[in-house]
Image: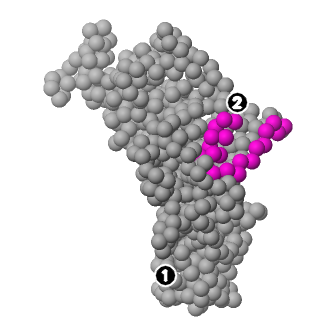
Amino acid sequence: MNIGFKEDLKNEFKSDRKKLPDQDIIDAVIAFANTNGGNLYLGVEDNGEITGLHKEHTDAVQLAAFIANKTVPPVTVEVEKSEDDTHIKVIVPKCRSIVASSSGKILRRRIKADGTPENVPLYPHEIHSRLSDLRLLDFSAQCVPGSEYADLDDTERERLRNIIRVYNGEKALLELDNEELDKALRLVDDVNGELKPTYTGMLLIGNPERLRLRVPTAEASFQVMNGTRVVMNESVNLPILAAFEKIATFMDARNSEEEIEMGFFRISVSDYNKRAFREALVNAFCHRDYTMLGRVRVLLDDNGLTISNPGGFIEGVTLDNLLTVEPHGRNLALADALKRIGLAERTGRGIDRIFEGSLLYGKPLPDYSESNDVMVRLFIPKSLPDREFTKLISDEQNRLGHELPINSLLVMNELKLDRRATLSELADSTHISESKLRITVESLVESGLIEAVGGGRARYYTLSVNVYKRGDNVTGYVRQTGIDKARFPEMILKFAENNNGVITRKDAAELLRISVQQAYRLLKSMVDDGKLQPEGKGKYAYYRIKT
């Protein structure tokens, strides 16, 4: 008998025919606890064959107690026996702290190059990274070992002050002297009466040479590829503020623009929205794991723009909730400093700006799907703007006097692509809860940007006729809505023919997915046209095919 699936990061099989050693059980448990949790199957071979349990591992309660006693802090597991008592599943939770065996061993789980899992040591330098992922440690707020206050560079500090002026940071910071500024932004910490640079300080305004020595992982690169030919490959070993300016300069020289006429005005649309690029680059520097080897990489190729950084998504962030999860980062002190000087989005919703940069112009959405546990990779496809959609959004924002919310832009984009969708379908595609989405779509209906068709849970939405008229595509609008409505009488007659010649308002409403009041008006119009005749009164009223 085979268990029916293979080992992976969340599942491990252990043979128990010769009694699996106690230490092997504990090793597997602490590795799962220090990664993402998982299931340990006792009595199963590596190939999935179920070969049975040793008699000493048949007591589920005793096994759970043994695991709790041999782990620090104690790991509470669930132990489930199979119906035929041939094997046991030990369900290990993901722990919110570092777990060790009672003998002091610390392990984690990873996938090897061949795709199979293994348990490996969690080394001391990796503990900082793990605690940062769990939001238990702000690495950027720690003092840099061996560093001195003189390691901070006056030239870089002046660059910081200039960024505050250019990007409308907190003007009050400009009134502070150097030491006061450094303390206010947590660039330094007081250690026994002496100012010591934090990682935030070294990363933002450290002397470049001292930075390379003290924080060797603070590296970036800008690459341009034409097919397989490397056009440019520039390494940037500078503090974040200097690196940001240098990479932005490289990008500006290669980010072409197209002008779109808007009545008496014109707007310039770049290949890659400048504000979105800025937020994406700041995010990469701000949220990368500085305990890991690697670098922030910006790549321009024929397909688009890729920005990647070491360190996976922080605890609680997934591909599905990127736009809805509460904002929080890996390096809180660094993120706070970047917000206060104006370089990062103050609300912490830089991800909204990244998506907005594509949504405003009807372009394909940014893609994070190639991200994994050790790398976040953002891809922004290169594409031409949708001119009519761009004009539509621009006109609406001018009418409102403010930018459209990100949820409204997401809904408009989905309806532009899919033509029609129910609330449930929109919730699935945008990953926004139906309760929040309902407010958004009703607001868009009121503004005349979209239309609602039908009623109840079958109610669906399309772009409004005014939107289609703007693009000289009234035919497209009729195709989405008019055809359905034109077939309503035909569908009612067909239903009645198969229901002893009669139909009620409730029948029509359920059949056509419209409200009872809409069904009444439709049936009445068919009576006026001589296709139906009413019979009965009140709740017993129905309609018969007129012969």
Which of the labelled discs sits on residue 254, or is there none? 2
Q: Is residue 475 above or below residue 272?
A: above
How many numbered marks have been drawn onto this rendered protein structure?
Answer: 2
Of tags 1 and 2, the one toward the viewer is 2
Q: Residues within 10 Å of mark 1 (few under 14, many from 20)?
A: some
Quadrant in which residue 242 is drawn: top right
Magenta span of residues: 229-250
Q: Which residue is mark 1?
A: 73
Q: Is residue 293 above or below residue 285?
A: below
Q: What residue do we see at 51% from left, 36% from top?
A: 166
Q: Is residue 251 above or below residue 199?
A: above
The residue under label 2 is which amino acid type?
Answer: Arg
Instruction: Pinpoint residue 320: horizontal percent, then vertical percent.
Output: 51, 48
Q: What residue do we see at 46% from left, 52% from top?
A: 177
Instruction: Pinpoint residue 284: horizontal percent, then vertical percent.
Output: 60, 49
Can residue 85 be seen in this snapshot? yes
In the figure, is residue 180 to the left or right of 40?
Answer: left
Q: Nearer the viewer, residue 321 or 211?
A: 211
